[in-house]
Amino acid sequence: MRQIREAERARAVKLQSKLIAESKEPRELEKQSVVTDIVTTLVVVVYGGEMICSPWLQFTPSFLTNHRYPLLFAVAQVFISNLPAVPAMSFQTELPLSFFDGLTRVLLLTAGCPGFILKHASPAISSSPWALMVTSLIMANGGFFLVNLFQMLSPYGWHIKTPPEFLPGGWRTMDLWVAPLITVVHALFTHSQESLVPYHHQLVHKIGSPTMFGGLEYISENEGPTVAVTKPMGEADARSLCAVVLCALFAYRTIINFGIDWNRTPSGVQAKRKHVIRSKHDGKRLSKDNIKATHKSG
């Protein structure tokens, strides 16, 4: 978040210099505050999804019962905020972190989010794949949705603006669709919900031979007809498979955002295009057009 904030501030300063040179009055930039950074990290990014889901699923947010992780995040944020400098986002720095992001995100999507649904007291909720996917979507992306809604990383201070998810093409943001996808795939392979077992059975039956996705076990009871029963994958195996998929997707996103520019003219001269930075956390676009639009709205 500090990388994104500093990139946005650098663009705002550049815009201010341009406006001053044109004898126009620039908009005043807000001073950075460690308290604002801590609030943005704790209340929104880390626990934002829990705060949104807790009233509907009737559970107590973890930051009210466990003080260790909020203090850990707060201390880490103070340390990062007081560093002299941090490297700018680039292909060399983001590609290794994309694998770490995949490994940590898979724990949230396969162990954290599903627990609130699978252990719910209401059978209608605990057995609903739709509730599983919606909860995963909100808890994994709710924090950064609020960050973009209130423009918490803007150098001009907090203000309300349409989040990128609701703008044209926002639905294609990778973090939006991988969250419910990974959660339901893990539940499908591990038979976490009975309603998903027939779909796993059809998948394994079409493959035919036993694979890493599961196999068929033929059971005959009381000398009756033989019945094919699908064996679920182990929790660790399914989570490992989801981690590989997530790491590959996040690495692909890094290559698209920071990799080689293939948009070249036939003469070999690189074509001019708008430079866009996307968050390594949620893939939102943060471009210089955001700064201009914000300046005009102010």
Image (cartoon, rainbow, N blue to C red):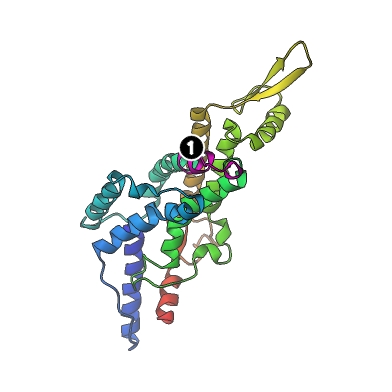
Where is residue 184? Give x, y as percent: 58, 41
The residue under the point 53% across, 60% down is 264
Q: Amino acid at mark 1?
A: Ala
Q: Is residue 276 visible?
A: no
Given residues 82 and 264, the one toward you in this image is: 82
- Number of other residues with Cα within 10 Å of mark 1, as a class: few under 14, some 14 to 19, many 20 or more: many
Residue 134 lies within the magenta run: no
Where is residue 171? Give x, y as percent: 57, 58
Q: Which residue is mark 1?
A: 243
Q: Quadrant of the N terminus?
A: bottom left
Given residues 134 and 126, the one toward you in this image is: 126
Q: Secondary structure at mark 1?
A: helix
Q: Is residue 226 visible?
A: yes
Given residues 199 and 271, the one toward you in this image is: 199
Residue at the limit of the structure toward the front, as seen here: 121
- Dominant SS of magenta comes to helix
Given residues 71 and 212, the one toward you in this image is: 71
The residue under the point 35% across, 83% down is 19
Where is residue 109? Give x, y as percent: 49, 42
Q: Which residues are magenta?
A: 111-125
In the rendered view, would you say 41 is above or below 223?
A: below
Q: Quadrant of the C terminus?
A: bottom left
In the rendered view, would you say 40 is above or below 11?
A: above
Residue at the limit of the structure toward the bottom, as seen here: 23
Residue 118 lies within the magenta run: yes
